[in-house]
Image: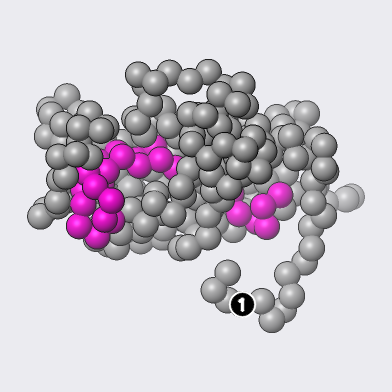
């Protein structure tokens, strides 16, 4: 009896599960400015080996106590932080809800942890990490500093770095009226990421799995 092969995502990205994240915020400083929305898109591998978006989980988030709310940022994303119809959650409850299906997907795909995929991914990761620390959320599923950034990938694949232009160049329909909501931007980023990975795997080939050396830096 032979052992079943590992799930495709268990080895494709060094054991990391790519999860697309987009945040909407009330400014640029992750330590002082409010986190207002988080959306996460999980991925799956189709029967023919293609990567594609799967489930989306998202929450509106109440500003943490003492959070800064930049008027210019709110005008840009159109968010009223205290509108009752937002049905916003406290940071801790929102993050726990979003992390639960991510942890399940990590286990189901035979991965070791999640890696954040984003457009200007460091921005999203900084706000996510700051909220995790503020809320004392345990077992953050994401790598603490490594990311996969569709800015660099889009520059390589399409010569574009702006999300809207990269999406259009890749053949993804873009609705400017819907942009700058966490769900919309995360789902378009997921389509963009999957398309680039699938092109690479088709035309270049899936990279061979190279075992990590025993002396690997533990920070990785």
Q: Residue at x 79, y 46 (%)?
A: 206
Q: In the displayed image of the protein, which residue is found farthest to the bottom? A: 215
Q: Give the side of residue 39 with respect to residue 117, left or right.
A: left
**Residue 16 is covered by the magenta coloring:** yes
8 lies above or below 16: above
Q: Quadrant of the C terminus?
A: bottom right
Local SS, label 1: loop
**Would you identify the image quadrant in which residue 183 lies?**
top left
Q: How far across and how far down the image is residue 210, in percent?
A: 79, 63
48 lies above or below 155: above
Q: Give the side of residue 49 with respect to residue 159, left or right.
A: right
The residue segment tinted magenta is 12-39
Q: Residue at x 68, y 57 (%)?
A: 14
Q: How far across and how far down the image is residue 94, in percent?
A: 29, 43
Q: Give the side of residue 93 with respect to residue 12, left or right.
A: left
Q: Give the side of residue 216 with respect to residue 60, left or right.
A: right
**Residue 75 is covered by the magenta coloring:** no
Instruction: State whether residue 34 appears in this view.
Output: yes
Q: Mark 1 sits on what residue?
A: 217
217 lies above or below 66: below
User: Considering depth in this image, is 108 or 162 the residue closer to the camera?
Assistant: 162
Q: How far across and how far down the image is residue 49, in percent?
A: 76, 34
Q: Residue at x 69, y 81 (%)?
A: 215
Q: Residue at x 77, y 66 (%)?
A: 211
Q: Residues within 10 Å of mark 1 (few under 14, many from 20)?
A: few
Instruction: State whether residue 62 appears in this view.
Output: no
User: Considering depth in this image, is 105 or 127 the residue closer to the camera?
Assistant: 127
Q: How is the image coloured?
A: one colour
User: Considering depth in this image, is 30 or 58 the residue closer to the camera?
Assistant: 30
Q: In the displayed image of the protein, which residue is found farthest to the front? A: 159
Q: How many marks?
A: 1
Q: How far across and how far down the image is residue 7, in percent?
A: 71, 45
């Amino acid at each position: 009896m032979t052992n079943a092969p590992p799930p495709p995502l268990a080895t494709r990205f060094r054991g990391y599960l790519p999860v697309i994240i987009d945040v909407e915020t009330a400014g640029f400083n992750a330590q002082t400015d409010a986190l207002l929305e988080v959306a996460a898109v999980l991925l799956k591998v189709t029967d023919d080996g293609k990567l594609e978006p799967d489930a989306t989980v998202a929450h509106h988030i109440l500003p943490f106590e003492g959070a800064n709310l930049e008027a210019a940022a709110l005008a840009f994303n159109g968010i009223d932080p205290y509108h009752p119809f937002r049905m916003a959650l406290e940071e801790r409850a929102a993050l726990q809800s979003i992390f639960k299906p991510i942890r399940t997907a990590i286990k189901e795909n035979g991965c070791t942890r999640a890696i954040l995929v984003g457009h200007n991914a460091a921005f999203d990761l900084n706000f996510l990490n700051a909220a995790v620390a503020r809320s004392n959320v345990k077992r953050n599923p994401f790598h603490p500093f490594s990311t996969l950034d569709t800015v660099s990938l889009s520059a390589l694949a399409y010569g574009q770095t702006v999300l809207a232009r990269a999406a259009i160049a890749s053949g993804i329909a873009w609705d400017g009226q819907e942009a700058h909501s966490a769900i919309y931007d995360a789902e378009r980023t997921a389509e963009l990421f999957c398309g680039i990975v699938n092109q690479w795997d088709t035309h270049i080939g899936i990279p061979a799995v190279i075992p990590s050396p025993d002396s690997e830096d533990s920070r990785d």
